[in-house]
Image: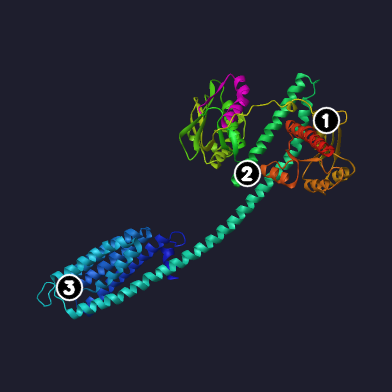
């Protein structure tokens, strides 16, 4: 309790700064003991022992000086300076007392063990040497100049010397108890503070985890809810764009709707990506791919937009073609797309160049690949170059108003590159353009030949196959969109497209009718899509149907989850018409042709 009161007076708190509190307590002990001993010495010398002239005054003055130094120093929160000055004052007083006392050691000698012990506690073992120096000099002065007779300058009595040393040893115990109690009290306070802080941290951690979980659930739910109407907007727009009777004005209006829908979808995907990265839930794919081809194809995607603005777009590749590496091509393409998109957006004249090269020598099969995107655009001021990698951050509000965007792209790029063990840097000057440089460690794969790109007729031509298709979705808009897209893709007189508004209705229809393809929504009332798929697999008529998960749960984790559950394929909402064409072509053309070949083979074996 006493030490806590002293802590309040000195402004020290062992729960906040343990070291400062200990030094403050030692300074208080120095001040109190030296002041007390000075007063006791003055009293004894003046009224009891009849000491030499001036000694009582020396004790009184030194105690007053020590008290003043201690009070001022501690109130100014300077414990180190306070201890240093008092140690210096003690050395001066003891030397003066030793010289003037002649007949015996001064009682102030009992203060010496505390000086050494306090210095050790406050400043460590090295400080002990500094504290011992005046102590050693003091005893050297006594022993070198004293003589066991009464005529020496510092005569002493051997018995008195022994008694004094015994008293000093006993007083050392007092110092140990004093400083030990200080340490014990401060340690207890610090331990209690640490325990309380740990409890608060645990509570804060639990709250943060719950908040993060709630945020993730909110983003996932909002993603699903936004994708559902967005599927109707983009899907029906694609269906209407295929109408050959549209006027140019109508076609421009539909293009504007399509671009706006895709911009909203891109924003939604960026928010989901950022949420996954922050939650450390984003997993990178690892497979072989041609880096040169990826950079070339990604650049070609932006060439038309760049040339429409009069900006030249070039690629410089020092890796050669092909350049097979191991990594995540989807995420790397996302990063390059974002950098090129920004370059095209903020460059109004001049050129944009993309360079690809290796840095240094390969080590253990790993090559340091450097990808740089340079432009001659508006540039970025120096004080904003680090901030633009923060989420929702742009150079200033005028940029947002003029060019649009959310400021998420570069934040995602930095996090994706860091997750690939790489680094992205920026060099830019206002009005002269910017250069974004990516350094990535990638494992090179030798001996691969470039695959010959083949044009897929199904990507531009309708699928001609008789089929019975079931569209399952609890939202009527999604049913209409999918039915319209299917009827646009599959051209056959025998095409039948049915619909169901829930999993239970889908199972009932699949039980009574044989379907070739079932486009199954996942999140539905009464019976979800996974349960409906499993029930359809057990029916006699539609057990072999190709059941495709069509869902707004659009992450790679969901894709793997649904394929592992037994779905034949996966389509995220909003459904892209090219992806739906791929799924239907696989189900109605490829799989059917393979099945006919197996049936023919079995027939030939049976005939033998």
Q: CA distance from mark 3 to mark 1?
A: 121 Å
Taking the spot 65% from the left edge, 26% from the top edge, the residue there is 453
In x, y percent, where is residue 403?
Answer: 61, 28
Comparing labels 3 and 1, the label whose residue is closer to the camera: 1
Q: Is residue 315 magenta?
A: yes
Q: What is the number of the mark on residue 465?
A: 1
What kind of element bears circle 2?
helix
* Nearest the eye: 353 or 402: 353
Residue 258 in view of the camera = yes
Q: Secondary structure at mark 1?
A: loop
Circle 3: element type: helix
Mark 3 / mark 2, whichever is N-terminal: 3
Kindly identify which numbered label has been placed on residue 606: none
Q: Which mark is residue 275?
A: 2
Q: Is residue 3 positioned above or below 358 on the image?
A: below
- Pointers 3 and 2 in contact (CB under 8 A)? no
458 left or right of 360 in image: right
Residue 24 falls inside the magenta stretch: no
From the image, state whether disc 1 or disc 2 is nearer to you: 1
Q: Which stretch did the figure color magenta?
A: 291-318
Asked which quadrant contains residue 477, the reply is top right
Disc 3 designates what residue? 101
């Amino acid at each position: 309790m006493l030490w806590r009161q002293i802590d309040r007076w000195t402004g020290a708190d062992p729960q906040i700064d343990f070291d400062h509190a200990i030094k403050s307590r030692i300074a208080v002990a120095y001040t109190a003991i030296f002041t007390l001993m000075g007063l006791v010495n003055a009293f004894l010398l003046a009224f009891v022992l009849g000491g030499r002239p001036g000694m009582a005054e020396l004790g009184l003055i030194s105690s007053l000086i020590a008290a003043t130094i201690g009070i001022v120093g501690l109130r100014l929160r300077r414990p180190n300076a306070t201890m240093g000055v008092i140690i210096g004052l003690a050395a001066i007083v003891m030397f003066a007392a030793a010289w003037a006392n002649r007949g015996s050691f001064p009682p102030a000698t009992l203060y010496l063990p505390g000086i050494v012990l306090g210095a050790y506690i406050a400043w460590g073992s090295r400080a002990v040497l500094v504290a011992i120096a005046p102590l050693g000099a003091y005893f050297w002065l006594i022993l070198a100049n004293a003589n066991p007779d009464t005529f020496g300058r510092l005569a002493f009595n051997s018995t008195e010397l022994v008694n004094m040393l015994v008293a000093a040893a006993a007083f050392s115990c007092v110092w140990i108890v004093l400083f030990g109690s200080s340490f014990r009290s401060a340690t207890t306070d610090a331990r209690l503070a640490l325990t309380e802080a740990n409890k608060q941290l645990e509570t804060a951690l639990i709250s943060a985890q719950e908040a993060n979980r709630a945020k993730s659930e909110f983003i996932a739910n909002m993603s699903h809810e936004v994708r559902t109407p967005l599927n109707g907007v983009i899907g029906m727009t694609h269906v209407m764009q295929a109408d050959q009777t549209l006027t140019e004005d109508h076609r421009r209006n539909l293009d504007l709707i399509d671009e706006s829908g895709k911009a909203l979808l891109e924003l939604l995907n960026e928010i989901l990506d950022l949420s996954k990265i922050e939650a450390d839930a984003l997993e990178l794919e690892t497979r072989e791919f041609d880096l040169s081809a990826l950079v070339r194809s990604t650049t070609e995607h932006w060439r038309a937009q760049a040339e429409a603005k009069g900006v030249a777009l070039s690629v410089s590749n020092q890796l050669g073609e092909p350049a097979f590496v191991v990594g995540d091509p989807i995420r790397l393409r996302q990063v390059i797309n974002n950098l090129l998109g920004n370059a095209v957006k903020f460059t109004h004249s001049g050129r944009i160049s993309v360079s690809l090269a290796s840095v240094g020598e390969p080590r253990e099969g790993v090559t340091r690949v450097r990808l740089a995107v340079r432009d001659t655009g508006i540039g970025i001021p120096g004080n904003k170059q680090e901030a633009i990698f923060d989420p929702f951050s742009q150079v200033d509000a005028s940029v947002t108003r003029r060019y649009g965007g959310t400021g998420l792209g570069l934040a995602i790029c930095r996090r994706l590159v860091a997750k690939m063990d790489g680094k992205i840097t920026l060099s830019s000057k206002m009005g002269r353009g910017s250069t974004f440089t990516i350094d990535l460690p990638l494992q090179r794969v030798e001996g691969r030949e470039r695959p010959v790109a083949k044009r897929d007729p199904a990507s531009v031509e309708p699928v001609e196959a008789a089929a019975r298709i079931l569209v399952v979705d609890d939202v009527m808009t999604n049913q209409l969109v999918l039915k319209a897209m299917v009827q646009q893709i599959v051209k056959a007189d025998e095409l039948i497209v049915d619909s169901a508004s829930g999993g239970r209705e889908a199972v009932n229809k699949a039980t009574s009718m044989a379907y070739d393809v079932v486009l199954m929504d996942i999140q539905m009332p009464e019976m979800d899509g996974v349960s409906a798929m499993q029930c359809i697999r057990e029916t006699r008529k539609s057990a072999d149907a190709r059941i495709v998960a069509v869902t707004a749960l659009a992450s790679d984790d969901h894709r793997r989850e649904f394929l592992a559950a037994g779905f034949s394929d996966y389509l995220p909402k909003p459904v892209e018409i090219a992806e739906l064409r791929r799924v239907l072509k696989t189900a109605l053309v490829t799989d059917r042709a393979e099945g006919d070949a197996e049936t023919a083979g079995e027939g030939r074996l049976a005939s033998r």
